[in-house]
Amino acid sequence: MPGTLKGANVLNVTTAGTRVQLPNIPCKTVTVIAKRTNTGSIFCGMNTVNNTTVYGVELEQKEAYDFDVFNANEIWIDASVSGEGVSYVAV
């Protein structure tokens, strides 16, 4: 049975190399989708994720990954290109 939507939005990395945390949304799963307008890579993972040593998942435009977490704020993103980002859905 599908879960109830808890939150959905977009999140950008203002400066490549400076990770950004997803917001505080209690949930079971978060799907992170690299924006279709991205020209570089998005890196998703824990608070150690960055755009040079890739701790986590690397996504190219329109690629997605599901994270089983208790809160969306457990996920951080970074980008190889400033201003690029993700959309996400928390259930």
Image (cartoon, rainbow, N blue to C red):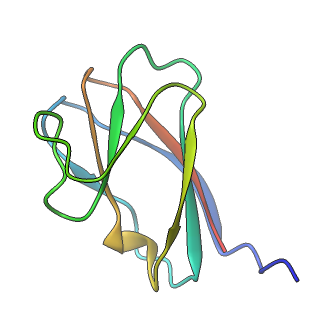
Among all residues in the image, which is located at the extreme right? 1
Q: Is residue 43 left or right of residue 86?
A: left
Which quarter of the figure has residue 7?
bottom right
Q: Tell me what residue is drawn at x 11 percent, y 33 percent.
A: 52
Which quarter of the figure has residue 13?
top left
Q: Position of residue 16 (x, y in %)?
A: 18, 29
Q: Tell me what residue is drawn at x 41 percent, y 76 percent.
A: 24
Q: Tell me what residue is drawn at x 36 percent, y 35 percent.
A: 42
Q: Tell me what residue is drawn at x 24 percent, y 25 percent.
A: 80
Whether residue 29 is situated above or below residue 28 in the rendered picture = above
- The quadrant of the rendering that contains the N terminus is bottom right
Between 57 and 71, which is closer to the camera in this rendering? 57
Q: Position of residue 85 (x, y in %)?
A: 42, 35
Among all residues in the image, which is located at the extreme top? 39
Whether residue 75 is situated above or below residue 5 in the rendered picture = above
- The quadrant of the rendering that contains the C terminus is bottom right
Q: Position of residue 53 (x, y in %)?
A: 11, 40
Q: Across the whole image, how many numbered discs are drawn on residues? A: 0
Q: Is residue 80 left or right of residue 37?
A: left
Between 86 and 41, which is closer to the camera in this rendering? 41
Q: Position of residue 84 (x, y in %)?
A: 38, 27
Which quarter of the figure has residue 51?
top left
